[in-house]
Amino acid sequence: MDWLIDPFFYNWLILAIILLIVEVATFTLLFLWLGIAALIMVVITWTFPDLSMPLQLLLFAILSLLSVVMWSLLFKKRQAKSGSLIMNNRAQRYVGRTTVLIEPIDNGRGKVQLDDSYWRVESSVDLPIDTKIRVVGCRGTTLLVEAAD
């Protein structure tokens, strides 16, 4: 039973391997960072073999918390930069773009072509064909537009 206690770094290595295997099976990214914290604990316990188990557990908890918080902050920054918030909402990508009406807006509804697609549009005012418009929002697959200056 002494192998469970001495040396500690084997236990941390086993835990790191288990956490990384769980990460491969689940693809959550949480277990990846916990596994990295366990790998850091391998280095710490190999370097300082006299650390007590409560101190090791405290260090692991701190490392785990720091790694998950850093990952969370990094992920939020990357998500905001990459535009992944609108990845599954194609209509949202067109907000801010300008184009010309290919059908007049009559009773608040009309049609435009953006890139290779035709889109239904809604406006609070009726506009004639060939009017330059700006997309200001979307509701489902309908673009909300206003006349561009």
Image (cartoon, rainbow, N blue to C red):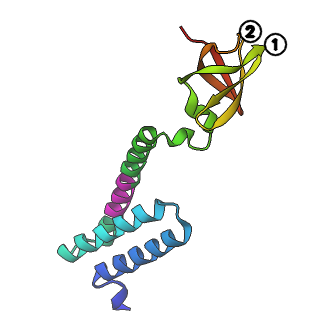
- Left or right of residue 23, residue 133 in this image: right
Q: Which residue is mark 1?
A: 107
Q: What residue type is disc 2 on? A: Asp
Going from N to C along the chain, the mark reached first, 1 or 2, is: 1
**Circle 1 — which element?**
loop
| Residue at 72% from the left image edge and 10% from the top image edge | 124
Q: Which mark is residue 66?
A: none
x, y percentage for residue 8?
30, 79
Of the 4 image quadrants, the one containing the N terminus is bottom left
Which residues make up the magenta segment?
57-67
For residue 69, side relative to residue 104 (left or right): left
Inspect the magenta stretch and tell me whether residue 64 lies in it.
Answer: yes
Read off the residue under disc 2: 126
Direction right: furthest residue: 107
Residue 21: x %, y % from top left: 47, 75
Disc 1 residue type (three-letter):
Asn
Residue 98 visible in the snapshot: yes
Classify mark 2: residues with Cα within 10 Å, few (<14), some (14-19) or many (20+): some
Q: Main secondary structure of the magenta part?
A: helix
Looking at the image, which residue is at 48% across and 39% down? 83
Residue located 42% across and 65% down the image: 32
Query: Which of 81 and 40 lies nearest the eye of the viewer?
Result: 81
The residue positioned farthest toward the left in the image shown:
47
Any part of residue 49 in sight = no
Marks 1 and 2 in Cβ contact (< 8 Å)? yes
In the picture, measured across the screen, residue 41 lies left or right of residue 122, that is left
Figure check: 33 above or below 104: below
* Residue 110: x %, y % from top left: 75, 20
Q: Quadrant of the rendered structure where residue 5 is?
A: bottom left
